[in-house]
Image (tube, coloured by chain):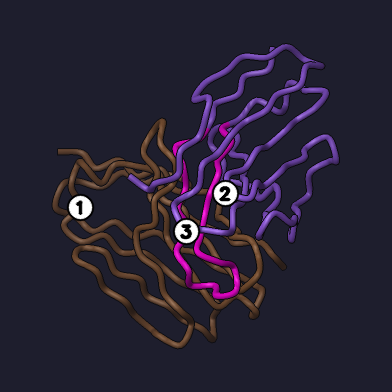
Chain colours: A purple, B brown
């Protein structure tokens, strides 16, 4: 149990729709990041938030956006869904990003299927 | 240069045997190398991690060997058990930056 909870666990959306995924980070963790994991691949970094500010972004288009709230929970929003967006979306939290050795805890993910 | 390479893609080991997974990196700025274990339907969980100033780290049956000059590191699982069957990801990280994952190794330990 990592203390990182994600919702929903599974969902199915139609191409062109929008989706919001939610994450509650471990208590006291002010850094949250989102990863996309396609079937059979390693997680790919989408973006990271530190104290409500985005401070890092991977190679994902602007239709992937996010928010971090004052309680450090977070949302991932994806607009204009495409079939290739079907994947496991992982939220991860850590105490801070100033030290590379701070353990990053992953949630169990949200499985998104786009049809 | 941000890539982490990992091999083999899949591995079958008999119970009690040694599982070895190898990784390589290019970016010398990486200063933290974690290994993650992922079971089907679950998120990755930190297994063991090492810094490049250490050549070896052991935790129970799991050992990381690190070769800084070759920019390579490996995970050894001693006395492999069926419960170790999972996908293993090596990864690399710097401060203030994302975790870069390798493509993963699917390990099956057969009785």
Tell me the quarter of the picture where residue A4 sits: top left
Q: Which mark is residue A71?
A: 2
> Which part of the image, by quadrant, shows the N terminus of chain A?
top left
Residue occupying image coordinates x 40% and y 69%: B49
Residue occupying image coordinates x 78% and y 49%: A59
> Mark 1 touching mark 3, by CB under 8 A?
no
C-alpha distance separating marks 1 and 3: 36 Å
User: What x and y, as percent, mark residue B40?
Assistant: 39, 33
Q: Nearer the viewer, residue B97 or A8?
A: A8
Chain-order first, disc 3 or disc 2 = 3
Chain on which label 1 sits: B
Q: Using the image, determine if residue A23 lies above or below residue A102.
A: above
Residue occupying image coordinates x 51% and y 42%: A24
Q: Using the image, determine if residue A46 lies above or below residue B60.
A: above
Question: Which residue has dot 1 on it?
Answer: B80
Q: Using the image, determine if residue A99 lies above or below residue A59.
A: below
Residue occupying image coordinates x 45% and y 51%: A26
Looking at the rendered image, the disc whose residue lies closer to the viewer, 2 or 1, is 2
Chain on which label 3 sits: A
Question: Which residue has dot 3 on it?
Answer: A28
Q: Secondary structure at mark 3?
A: loop
What range of the chain is rendered magenta?
A88-109
Left or right of residue A78: residue B103: left
Q: Which mark is residue A61?
A: none
> Mark 3 touching mark 2, by CB under 8 A?
no
């Amino acid at each position: 149990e990592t203390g990182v909870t994600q919702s929903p666990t599974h969902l199915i959306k139609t191409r062109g729709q929008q989706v919001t995924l939610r994450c509650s980070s471990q208590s006291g963790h002010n850094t949250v990041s989102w990863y996309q994991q396609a079937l059979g691949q390693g997680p790919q970094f989408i973006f990271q938030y530190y104290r409500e500010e985005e401070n890092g972004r991977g190679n994902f288009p602007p239709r992937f956006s996010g928010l971090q709230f004052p309680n450090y929970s977070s949302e991932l929003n994806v607009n204009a869904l495409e079939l290739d967006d079907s994947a496991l979306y992982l939220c991860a939290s850590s105490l801070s990003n100033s030290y590379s050795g701070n353990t990053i805890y992953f949630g169990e993910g949200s499985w998104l299927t786009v049809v | 240069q941000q890539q982490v390479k990992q091999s083999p893609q899949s591995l079958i080991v008999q119970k009690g045997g040694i599982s070895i997974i190898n990784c390589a990196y290019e970016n010398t700025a990486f200063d933290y190398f974690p290994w993650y274990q992922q079971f089907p339907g679950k998120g990755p969980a930190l297994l063991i991690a090492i810094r490049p100033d250490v050549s070896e780290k052991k935790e129970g049956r799991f050992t990381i060997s690190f070769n800084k000059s070759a920019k390579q590191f490996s995970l050894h699982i001693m006395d492999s058990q069926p419960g170790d069957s999972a996908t293993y990801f090596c990864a690399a990280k710097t401060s203030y930056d994302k975790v870069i994952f390798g493509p993963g190794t699917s390990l099956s330990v057969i009785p």
